[in-house]
Image (cartoon, grey):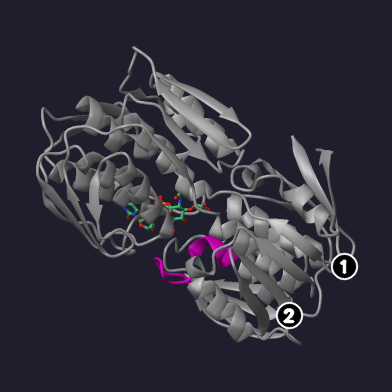
Amino acid sequence: MDKLVIEGGVRLKGEVVVSGSKNSVLPIMAATLLTDQTCVIKGVPNLRDTNTMLKILRSLGKNTEFYKGTVTVSATKHANFTADYKLVSTMRASFCVLGPLLGKLKKAKVSLPGGCVIGLRPVDLHLKGIESLGADISIESGYVVAKAARLRGKHIYLGGVYGSSVLATGNVMMAAVLAQGKTIIEAAACEPEVADLAELLNKMGARIKGEGTPTIEIDGVKELRGVTHTIIPDRIEAGTFMIAALITKGDILIKNALAQHQGALLDKLDEAGALISKGDNCLRVRARGRIKPINVTTLPYPGFPTDMQAQIMSLMAVTPGISVITEKIYPDRFMHVAELNRMGAHIQREGPHAIVEGIKSLSGAPVMASDLRASASLVLAGLVAKGRTSVSRIYHLERGYENIESKLQGLGAKIWREKE
Ligand code: EPZ
């Protein structure tokens, strides 16, 4: 197992190119199950999670090729409707094969995803939505077993305790595209990744309207065709590099980044004192004098993304003054707090709130990653800490960041990989 070692104190400068979106490509790869024709997906990041989804597609009877950012998925004669525990348990997002399998094969057997360190993460909304389309659903030996001679369009309210659900919206949308009649998804997730999935499905011959808004309308069609599609850039990776620029008092031009996907984050960084220049498909980020403490509350899109909560906490940890960070999507998503405090941060947790008393500097220390975004926040803290930080269990980081250490090295960071 590897760890990352970081010598802090370097101002990051230069250009970085953001990869394609992990959270867009995973449901998009699942959508290839909706057709027997060949699908070509471009701009695919080489991540642990994308490779897990390729394994799942192969276990479901697909041929897959992955070469230089392009995934090609084609059918074999052996379509299989069971997504097994061994694969699904390693990546929750694989649960979104349920909708396309049921839509295409009229039956699906998908392992329940199991626990996650960032929170309970139930799938009740996924099941509610798919059951509303007329599927017969049962839970057997840890698997969701779903059957339906024919799915029928329905008006479905998909709002949950914490608001809309990104993957439940995608799962239900993928089941509804081949259903008979019209489906309306109310309280749908509005994330750009949901809109990207809908764009792909419409290119395959689906009839979807309202994607990117809380009300999505789907008129079912008989079948879908193959497609070629380029996925959107990863807005969370772009956000992570924005914080890297500010926390190191550097100046970074972030390429393949769309300002229109970053409203809430750019607004908060502006409030904190960042100087942000928006260009065509790029953003330049640097500090305008001292960064100021700010309060942040995570919400479903277009609110502040929960996947940027840990990273902005690292910035506030070295910003003198008091900041309050409130987590409204995963109230327990605070595994990074104890590790940041090991580096000398003053962060106190009060239920879904973290009270951050910003200090001048952190000190390097051995820390442990617990999940994808927590690991990013520890790398950011290591970039500014005095001395050396080592971040272990970086397999979490590799799930969602492509070549992060060489990208950071390209900006001048002293970061390298070592065996544990
Ligand atoms: C997606 O997960 C992302 N993952 C997550 O990113 C992200 O944190 C999350 O959306 C919220 O933005 C992918 O797209 C692969 P949700 P998803 O369903 O769809 C509750 C990362 O770091 N809920 O929108 O699984 C749930 O517990 C990952 O890249 C139910 O109660 O998240 C949560 O509190 C981490 N019942 C809230 O809704 C359900 O059936 C939002 O979750 C489904 C969800």
- Kindly tell me whether residue 36 is visible in this rendering: yes
Disc 2 to disc 1, C-alpha distance:
16 Å
Q: Are marks 2 and 1 in contact (CB under 8 Å)?
A: no
Residue 243 rendering spot, x and y as whole percentages: 67, 68
- Can you tell which of label 2 and label 1 is closer to the viewer? 2
Identify the residue at image location x=76%, y=38%: 2
Ligand 1 falls in quadrant = bottom left
Is residue 144 located in the magenta-colored stretch of the structure?
Answer: no
Q: Is residue 373 above or below residue 145?
A: below
Q: Earlier in the sequence, mark 2 or mark 1?
A: 1
Between residues 317 and 283, which one lies in front from this camera angle?
283
Q: Is residue 207 left or right of residue 46?
A: left
What amino acid is labelled 2 in the image? Ala
Q: Write down the region rendered in magenta.
A: 297-310
Does the magenta run of residues contain 302? Answer: yes
Q: Residue 287: which disc? A: 2
Kindly identify which residue carries mark 1.
9
- Label 2: few (<14), some or many (≥20) within 10 Å? many
Q: Is residue 29 above or below residue 147?
A: below
